[in-house]
Amino acid sequence: MACPSSRFALLVLILIFNATPASACRGPLRSFEENLAMAGTVFVGRISAVKAHRAGPGAADDEGVAITFVVERYWKGEGSAAVTVFAGTDSCGFARGGQRAVGEKWLILAGAGPRVSTSLLSGNVWLEDEYHQSMGQKIPAQLGRRLGSGRVPRTP
């Protein structure tokens, strides 16, 4: 039989590891391939601007940032040389806490439509930081073959 102090220590550990902040990101964890299939916009680009964004008065759920990317290659979407992606700053937001910097390079998997948006659950891959240092993350080889070489965006 365990002594009371070891039971207490076990209970504390269980509570610590099971404690989840109320703002924790929860959602379906899909494979990269599933996220890729669901995405309407897929490109590799570098962040050129990050601006606070709010849809309008009383739209607290829609607070976030508008992140403009200079597109290097694209696979799905309009094929523009620049794409603005809207992202939340909440726990599931791609710009969580506003933490995105000009110069970062990303593989972005986002929705399609007039307002392209993405989140932490979309399967984006951070390729380089703003100082052009590799983040050590690459597009998985199997998916890279599936994506193919992509297309160069059209210039205005």
Image (tube, rainbow, N blue to C red):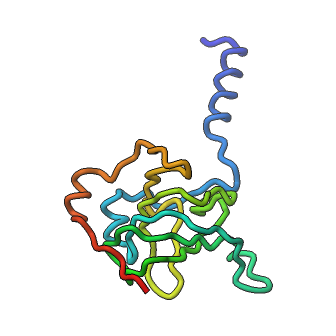
132, above or below 114, in the image: above
**Which one is nearer the viewer's eye here, 95 or 5?**
95
Residue 35 lies in what quarter of the image?
A: bottom left
Which residue is located at x 56 percent, y 72 percent?
68
Which residue corresponds to the image point at 72% horizontal and 15% vertical from the top-left?
A: 5
Query: Farthest front residue?
Result: 156
At 72% from the left and 79% from the top, the residue drawn is 54
Residue 134 x, y percent position in the rendering:
44, 45
The x, y position of residue 20, in whole percent, is 65, 46
Residue that appears at 79% across and 86% down: 57
Q: Quadrant of residue 63?
A: bottom right
Considering the image in quadrants, where does the C terminus appear? bottom left
Q: Is residue 57 left or right of residue 28?
A: right
The percent coordinates of residue 83 (x first, y second) are 49, 77
Question: In the rendered view, would you say 130 is above or below 18?
Answer: below
Give whichever of 104, 55 is nearer the camera: 104
Q: 90 or 116, which lies in front? A: 116
Q: Up-down: is 115 above or below 4?
A: below
* Picture quarter with the N terminus: top right
Residue 51 image position (x, y, % from top left) = 68, 71
- Indicate left or right for 40 with 14 as reference: left
Tag count: 0
